[in-house]
Amino acid sequence: MLFRVPGVPGRAVCAWWLLLLLGCWAAPANAQSASCALSLSGRISDHERRESLAGATVVVLETQQATQTEADGHYHLELCPGTYHVQVSFVGFASETAVLQVGAAVVRDFKLHPDAIVLQGAVVQGQHVTAPSPQPTATLSGQALQQTRGQALGEALQKISGVTAIQTGPSIFKPMIHGLHSNRVTILNNGVRQEGQQWGQEHGPEIDPFIASQLTVVKGAASVRYGSDAIGGVVLVEPKPLRDSVGTGGELQLVGMSNNGLGAASGTVEGNLRRLPALSWRAQGTAKRAGTMRAPGYYLKNSGFSEYDFSGALGWHKDTYGVEVFYSRFSTKLGILPAAHAESPTDLYAAIARQRPLETTSFNYDINRAYQQVRHDLLKATGFVKTGSIGRLQATVAQQVDYRNEYDLYDARNDDRAARNRPALSYTNRTTTGELLWEHKPLGHFSGSVGLAGTYQANRYASGTKGFIPYYNNTVGGAFAIERWQKQKWQVEAGVRADYRYLATRRAARELRDSVSVFYVDRQQFTYLTPAASLGAIYDATPHFSLSLTTSLTQRAPAVNERFSDGVHNAQYELGYDLVPGNGALHPETAYHTALTATWHDNPRFNGELTVYQTSIQGFIYQQPILPPVINIRGTLISWQYFQTNATLRGLDLGATYGLTPQWTLAGKATVVRGRDTKADQWQVYMPADRAELSVRYEASEAASPRLTQRYVHLTGYAVARQTRVPADYASKDYALPPAGYALLGLETGATVHWGRLPLEVSVAGSNLLNQRYRDYLNRYRYFADEMGRNVTLRVRIPLEFGGASH
């Protein structure tokens, strides 16, 4: 009987057997007896716990000789000279097969890896799976995401190593990845590129985080797949797939905070019909309101906000095709700190020098001028069809409308009620996007996709309000291709993309002609062809250790605000690069990015990841304060201006967990960024300071109480160093030096409370427990006020099930 050897062609096995028989026939009997007594021995153990495995089975596939390990895990066999496939197996562990060359006594140990064992019933749900990317990627989901409920999107993402935020006050957070933010970070809301008023660092993403079941951050340039703006990275806000089992269910999330009196409620209801199993639907809504924030020792006047959001989805899914429609609305009203307004330079510098704002208040929910009022609507339709047996074609079209009104302080003596109710800035941004993506099925070791993408955007401001940025029309068309090769331990991915952009602007301008001011309409057109290319590889060195390397080239066209912003915006004055005499025109950025990631994963005790990276950007566009402040009819204002230089950003992200015992887990993470202005040979401004976090978590065993399960306590220490890597003449360029470093302490405890048949997930978390006074270098209000003081957050998640397949 001939035995089939996995991975060895049948004819090769037959040839081997023929040679073996001929050799045995030709050799004398005593020679055969002597040569076939070569020893094969070793020890079989658990790879994770290093314990011996007694009773493990060892089989030589060619001869079918078999044995079992002894109590100490050792085995012994006798073989003739030759090459053998030796298979080792044990219940609960993944089998391993090794090719051994036997020419003398051989000692070979095996360390088996635990295999997944199904202990309970499971629900199997099919969905499209994306292949692993060579780029460093991190995800917030499950309990880690639940611990951020009630926070803004940019604030929640800071739980991921390498992600910080540009902040404006207590409620506006703009994600920063590896020191890059705003137009260099692309955000996808349910698969659609978020397009709003990105022209302000104090404009947070107009997305309700409650909509997401998973937040994914791709760190580093991802411009081939997501467009030429994604030099810094990509944030994916991903709702869970529509329900595909018959019935109706949902959840209710409740959040309350002690510091600012925040109350939030978010509910989701979804269903799938028995008579139309292909049809699924979902409805979701969120209401959130917060009052004045309390810094240590005082309340921050006009720091409240309110938010009301809702979304709905309807899908029809079959095996070979499917369509889905999604709509969402985000609306918020945000107070602006009155301490940022000053009548004179003396008042401004006095406000910056104070330990606390001159104007404080008691707790209230009032939102007075100045404030922002923002609304974002998104309508998306997507569909897919399987293109026979060769692939899958997907099309997505979306329409977004973003409304932004900004209300400055008005003169209380002004009796013109209409003037009091009129916004200083009123913008409407309308964007239509489309994408066609074809993914081919694996051909040998290859898989990949090609796609086309397009965007048309029109930005307008209301008549009678100030034109902080001009009218503009922005048209973008792009094509891309990504191909992957995967074999055994290796995966290589390469991609190319090209985007053509046409930008037309129209703005009011004036110039002096014969000492007379002449006003006119300045119309300009810009065209750009921005390429992107990437190459990356993943090497799975062992079942627990992998290395990935990625390198890319990306160009990014300047945004309208970087060229033409001009005027007062959120109590600060901003000026675009093209409007500064002698600057000329802003040119595109060209970024060269390289990152190396080492990952130790899927271990029961220790897991970790280290990423080191470098991004060199020719023509780096950045904003920084300039002195002196601007004085106009609206007071004295901190002034910001856009500059262009060459810069290099280097850094590392480190994250690790270690299971001390089955109940105790130690975790840590650290982020280091070094930004250098290579043209001026000095440090780059507004780079994140070094930061680190250390936590210990205790998860109780489940034997104590059946009504109280999944109990845990989580203690966290968080430290941020003072940013000392600033230009040598920084004191002459900014209104205040970087603030001191700080350390914060947090504690969270939670459990699942079984109330009848209803499992309630309840947690209580405290942040800044020691009520430390501190200011963060990346907060644009650091000149005037401290960060939030002690805060206690209560979160409750109530899963709901109204009907199932049995109903």
Image (spheres, rainbow, N blue to C red):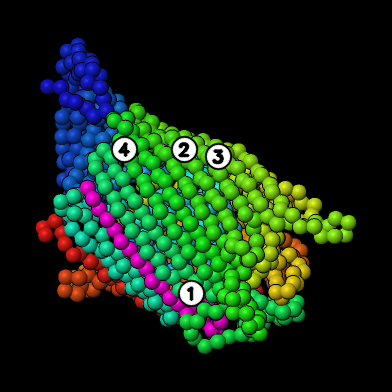
Measure how far apart labels 2 and 3 are at the Cα level: 10 Å
192 with respect to 387 (left or right)? right
Read off the residue under disc 4.
Answer: 385
Measure how far apart labels 2 and 1 are at the Cα level: 40 Å
Can residue 473 be spotted in the picture? yes
Name the secondary structure under disc 4.
strand
Residue 499 marker: 3
Residue 68, x across and y down, in percent: 16, 41
Read off the residue under disc 1.
Answer: 305
The quarter in which the C terminus is drawn is bottom left
Name the secondary structure under disc 1.
strand
Specify the segment rendered in magenta.
Answer: 278-304
Read off the residue under disc 2.
Answer: 452
Closer to the chain start, of discs 2 and 3, is 2
Residue at 56% across, 44% down: 475
Residue 319, x across and y down, in percent: 24, 40
Name the main secondary structure of what is drawn in magenta.
strand
- Report the front residue among 596 and 19: 596
Residue 292 on the magenta span: yes
Closer to the chain start, of discs 2 and 1, is 1
Going by the numbered disc 3, the residue's amino acid type is: Asp
Whether 419 is drawn above or below 200: the answer is below
Closer to the chain start, of discs 1 and 4, is 1
Measure how far apart labels 3 and 1 are at the Cα level: 38 Å
Asked if marks 1 and 4 touch (Cβ < 8 Å), the reply is: no
The quarter in which the N terminus is drawn is top left
Mark 1 surroundings: few (<14), some (14-19) or many (≥20) residues within 10 A: many
Name the secondary structure under disc 2.
strand
Asked if marks 2 and 4 touch (Cβ < 8 Å), the reply is: no
